[in-house]
Image (cartoon, rainbow, N blue to C red):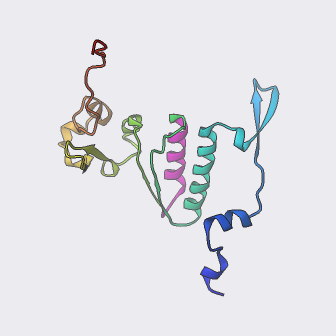
Amino acid sequence: MKEKDIWPKSRVEFLNSSKKKSLISTHLIKDEKQYQLNFDDESKGIQRYFGLAGLLTLMVKNPKIVFIDEIESSIHPDLVWHFLLTFLVNTKNSQLVVTTHLRDLLAEEDLIRKDSIWFTELKEDRYTDLFSLVNYPKKDLKNIYKAYKIGKFGAKPKLKDYFLDLED
């Protein structure tokens, strides 16, 4: 039997053919009272984190390259960092490529290599420039987080005055 014959022909078929199980989480309040929630009733952040945990399991067990757009979407920054640390410590041959607006990650210079940080900047002609952190002078790399915050690397929105002219 060929591999293509094993898998259903469409995503919808696959989802409908698999047995659906319910996931119930138990929450503890002040180490005493417990209550349960169906997974569908959990916050978007918890749901997303569980989804990321599934990807992490795949990356730990098998070499994979995984792309995650806006990893911080709906997730507390501490959970994002926990996920990234778990990935860095437990995977051997997998690669994770993420986009993020979470600039606090730039302060983690001991764990994130400079050559793995890339920036994008939308140009006036609507094209996007992509450039590496390592292209900047070493003096700008002493405190990456601060340098980014004050605009040394670009890749920041160009904001105008925040006062509204309501007389028009």
The quadrant of the picture occupied by the C terminus is top left
As for residue 89 lying within the magenta part, the answer is yes
Q: Which residues are magenta?
A: 78-94
Find residue 110 and report its horizontal and vertical position in percent: 39, 42
Most frequent secondary structure within the magenta stretch:
helix
Find residue 133 and report its horizontal and vertical position in percent: 26, 46
Position of residue 53 in the picture relative to residue 109 (left or right): right
Residue under the point 26% across and 43% down: 121
As for residue 168 lying within the magenta part, the answer is no
Find residue 112 and report its horizontal and vertical position in percent: 39, 46
The quadrant of the picture occupied by the N terminus is bottom right
Residue under the point 51% across and 66% down: 63
Residue sitting at the far top: 167
Find residue 36 and report its horizontal and vertical position in percent: 79, 36
Which one is nearer the viewer's eye here, 61 or 48? 48
Position of residue 12 in the picture relative to residue 113 (left or right): right
Location of residue 18 (image quadrant): bottom right
Residue under the point 41% across and 43% down: 100
